Image (cartoon, helix red, strand yellow):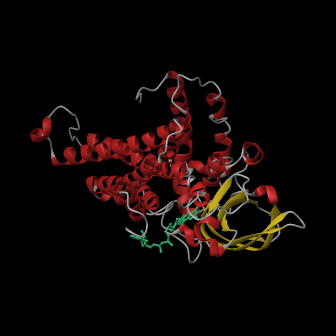
């Protein structure tokens, strides 16, 4: 049964995260304009917030399940501002989610404390990850993998301690040859060659990685299975499973910011005397109130789609379809919500004196990384219609 009620423990955790998130919000504009390290005064302030992990230890079986509370925490963090991730530091990268989804127990223990980025995209490989050209060749003599290739648009690429990369063991094996590997920074042959300048989420860097004869221990293969399975027998599907948790999480990043935009818009509309009560009925409402409430409904539907995908994962059920639905719904909703809030507030919406214009820029990425909106719609259609890739592409 899905229970929508939060327990006292859940509420305590979310209240804590939201309070902490407001510290980060104070420095949001600084990040946006400087793309810099966390300012020292913010670090001092952040010391009063030891982190949510101690509260997580108090959780019981009665509380909301692990992935669902994880999504709610993510939304509460980015409700402060995307920049809150800058001082969350360890364990909060997309690569960490991949480690959690595909790593062995031993690997999770060994690398769980590192901040890990996730690198799939290459100059010739974006929407179709089966086109990965980066290679991993096993050197039996030294018991090492030798990695060669280039990865672009790596979120948290500069700041991360290491990366989970997708590489192929055999280009001729297609999807079946692709595996994920963990590579730590400072490994010889691993170079961070470029940092992007971008529209939004400037608090998080986006980097290019080059691997040149980069040698990593044999045990750095995520999940630990080396054999190349026959096409269609699950190797590629295994690494794709990572998306079943990172896609809802990506939607959750955006939904925290769109919620912040809605809260800001509500405050301003109420101050301007707009009646936002839910009791006046559609006939008695102003156009502004009707529009605002439609945006609120979008937010709620998208949040529920995220929690549903996470809940299925916690139940050990397949959530391939629901992960894509949550990403597609989240990606389009956050764009519509932040744009709608700007329209409602007029000049205030685009003024740099407020964060709304920044949230509008920050959420744009939700519909691009971890698979664009078009690709999610393709997956959803294929799954519902039971078409394979050759029938619908
Ligand atoms: C700021 C930022 C951060 C990123 N972070 C990461 C990261 O951490 N790790 C990582 O691996 N990647 C990351 N990416 C890369 C991102 O995942 C890719 O940009 C995305 O998957 C799209 O790939 P592409 O840019 O090559 O576009 P393309 O695949 O070239 O697609 C171009 C356009 O065509 C559309 N399209 C493609 N195929 C189809 C189709 N079959 N049907 C309909 N439309 C289609 C796409 O939706 C898109 O609109 C990041 C990108 C950005 C901009």
> Is residue 86 left or right of 346 when viewed as pictured?
right
| 388 is higher (above) or lower (below) than 325 | below
Where is the C terminus found, in terms of image quarters?
Answer: bottom left
> Is residue 329 left or right of 59 when viewed as pictured?
left
Which of the 4 quarters of the picture holds residue 118?
bottom right
Question: Residue drawn at (62%, 28%), measured in percent from left and top?
Answer: 55
Image coordinates of residue 10 in percent, x first then y, are 52, 28
As rendered, which of 10 and 222 lies closer to the eye? 222
Question: Residue drawn at (46%, 50%), measured in percent from left and top?
Answer: 323
Image coordinates of residue 275 in percent, x first then y, are 20, 38
| 130 is higher (above) or lower (below) than 108 | below
| 173 is higher (above) or lower (below) than 285 | below
Question: Residue drawn at (41%, 45%), measured in percent from left and top?
Answer: 260
As rendered, which of 268 and 201 lies closer to the eye? 201
| Circle count | 0
Residue 82 appearing in the image: no
């Amino acid at each position: 049964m899905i229970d929508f009620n939060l327990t006292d423990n859940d509420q305590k955790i979310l209240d804590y995260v939201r309070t902490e998130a407001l510290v980060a919000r104070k420095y949001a504009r600084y990040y946006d304009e400087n793309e810099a390290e966390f300012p020292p005064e913010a670090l001092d302030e952040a010391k009063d917030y030891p982190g949510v992990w101690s509260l997580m230890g108090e959780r019981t079986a009665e509380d909301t399940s692990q992935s669902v509370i994880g999504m709610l925490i993510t939304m509460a963090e980015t409700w402060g501002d995307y920049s809150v991730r800058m001082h969350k530091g360890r364990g909060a990268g997309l690569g960490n989610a991949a480690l959690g989804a595909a790593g062995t127990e031993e690997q999770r223990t060994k690398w769980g404390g590192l901040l890990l980025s996730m690198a799939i995209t290459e100059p010739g490989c974006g929407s179709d990850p089966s086109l990965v050209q980066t290679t991993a060749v096993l050197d039996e003599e030294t018991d090492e993998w030798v990695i060669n290739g280039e990865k672009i648009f790596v979120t948290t690429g500069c700041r991360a301690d290491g990366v989970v990369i997708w590489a192929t063991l055999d280009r001729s094996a297609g999807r079946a040859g692709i595996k994920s590997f963990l590579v730590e920074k400072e490994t010889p042959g691993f170079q961070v060659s470029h940092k992007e300048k971008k529209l939004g989420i400037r608090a998080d860097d986006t980097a290019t990685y080059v691997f040149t004869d980069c040698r990593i221990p044999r045990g750095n293969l995520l999940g630990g299975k080396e054999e190349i399975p026959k096409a269609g027998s699950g190797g590629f599907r295994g690494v794709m499973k990572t998306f079943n948790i990172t896609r809802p999480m990506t939607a959750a990043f955006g939904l925290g910011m769109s919620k912040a935009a809605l809260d800001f818009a509500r405050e301003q509309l109420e101050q301007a005397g707009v009646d936002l009560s839910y009791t006046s009925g559609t006939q008695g409402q102003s156009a502004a109130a009707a529009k605002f409430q439609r945006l609120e409904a979008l937010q709620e539907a998208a949040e529920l789609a995220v929690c549903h995908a996470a809940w299925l994962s916690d139940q050990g059920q397949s959530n391939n379809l629901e992960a894509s639905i949550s990403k597609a719904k989240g990606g389009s909703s956050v764009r519509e919500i932040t744009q709608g809030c700007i329209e409602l507030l007029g000049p205030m919406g685009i003024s740099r004196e407020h964060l709304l214009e920044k949230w509008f820029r920050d959420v744009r990425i939700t519909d691009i990384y971890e698979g664009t909106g078009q690709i999610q719609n393709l997956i959803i259609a294929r799954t519902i219609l039971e078409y394979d890739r050759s029938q619908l592409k």
